[in-house]
Image: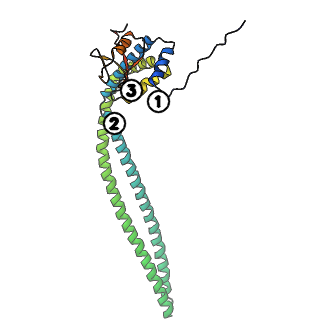
């Protein structure tokens, strides 16, 4: 007796450029019936809409907070850099002061030698060394003065940045508190919606969910699933839908894609059969 060999269905990987024809075929091939999947997509879109409305309540606050945080971080970074520069100038002053002490000791040694010599040639030579050492001492003194001026300038810059930072921190704290109040007031509702959204998404196969997300990202109002508008038009782009497609939408037995904007068109729960 001949045995029938069972063939295993080959699942092709998701292609971001796949045609709506292949998506429609996949839609029909899955175990979950089409009507139920369309209802799930409709509910998923509504959940996403509700979540976006809550996020919109925050307005520009998240970006304003992020911008202020970036400015505060930049100011703190500049202050840290200037403090490092000041520290280096202070180290240089210490080194130059030590050099001056060393030069003074060497000059004193040459002065003592002057008292013990009678040779004019050696006298001139020692005086020349004292002159050179004196020049080096003046150079160090000049550099110390310049370093102290630079330190004063950098401290003034730190003060200016610090004053700006104080204003930024006050503004940032106020914005954070305002945002926190809005988030807190909607947190419970958002948590419920996100949970519902995740549950709905879990009901869809990977290919359908990928297509839904891709359509949402490609349209300005993030509406991937729409209903019929005014009885004969796509609720997304408002272009006229053919009578045959309107029948298919109302039946809920087939995935219908708007040929103009690429959105999925479904019947509202009241008109679904």
x and y, in percent, of residue 223 in the image: 35, 24
- Total number of numbered discs in the rendering: 3
Q: Earlier in the sequence, mark 3 or mark 2?
A: 2
User: Where, quadrant-wise, is the C terminus in this rendering?
Assistant: top left
Q: Pointer 1: what residue?
A: 17
Placement of 201 over or under 134, stated as above or below: above
Q: Earlier in the sequence, mark 3 or mark 1?
A: 1
Q: Pointer 2: what residue?
A: 63
Label 3, secondary structure: give it.
helix
x and y, in percent, of residue 158 in the image: 34, 53
Lateral position of residue 267 relative to residue 34, left or right: left
Of badges 3 and 2, the one in the foreground is 3
Q: Earlier in the sequence, mark 2 or mark 1?
A: 1
Q: CA distance from mark 3 to mark 2?
A: 22 Å
Q: Residues within 10 Å of mark 2 (few under 14, many from 20)?
A: few
In the rendered image, which quarter is residue 44 located in? top left
Q: Is residue 253 visible?
A: yes
Q: Pointer 3: what residue?
A: 216
- What residue is shown at x 48% (from left), y 18% (from top)? 25
Q: CA distance from mark 2 to mark 1?
A: 33 Å
Label 2, secondary structure: give it.
helix
Q: Residues within 10 Å of mark 3 (few under 14, many from 20)?
A: some
x and y, in percent, of residue 160 in the image: 30, 52
Lateral position of residue 120 relative to residue 3, left or right: left
Q: CA distance from mark 3 to mark 1?
A: 15 Å
Give whichever of 186, 24 is nearer the camera: 24
Placement of 54 over or under 71, stated as above or below: above
């Amino acid at each position: 007796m001949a045995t029938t060999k069972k063939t295993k269905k080959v699942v092709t990987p998701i292609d971001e450029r796949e045609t709506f024809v292949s998506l429609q075929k996949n839609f029909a091939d899955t175990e979950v019936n089409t009507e139920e999947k369309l209802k799930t997509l409709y509910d998923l879109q509504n959940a996403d809409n509700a979540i976006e409305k809550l996020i919109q309540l925050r307005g520009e606050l998240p970006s304003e907070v992020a911008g202020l945080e970036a400015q505060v971080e930049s100011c703190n970074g500049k202050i840290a850099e200037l403090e490092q520069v000041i520290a280096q100038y202070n180290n240089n002053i210490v080194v130059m002061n030590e050099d001056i002490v060393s030069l003074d000791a060497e000059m004193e040694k040459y002065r003592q030698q002057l008292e013990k010599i009678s040779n004019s040639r050696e006298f001139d030579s020692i005086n020349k060394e004292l002159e050179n050492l004196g020049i080096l001492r003046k150079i160090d003194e000049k550099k110390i003065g310049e370093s102290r001026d630079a330190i004063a300038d950098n401290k003034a810059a730190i003060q200016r940045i610090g004053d700006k930072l104080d204003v930024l921190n006050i503004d940032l704290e106020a914005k954070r508190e305002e945002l926190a109040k809005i988030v807190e007031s909607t947190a419970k509702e958002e948590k419920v919606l996100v949970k519902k959204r995740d549950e709905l998404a879990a009901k869809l196969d990977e290919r359908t969910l990928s297509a839904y997300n891709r359509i949402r990202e490609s349209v300005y109002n993030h509406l991937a699933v729409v209903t019929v508008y005014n009885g004969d038009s796509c609720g997304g782009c408002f272009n006229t839908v053919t009578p045959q497609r309107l029948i298919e939408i109302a039946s809920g037995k087939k995935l219908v894609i708007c040929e103009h904007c690429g959105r999925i068109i479904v019947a509202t729960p009241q008109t679904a059969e």
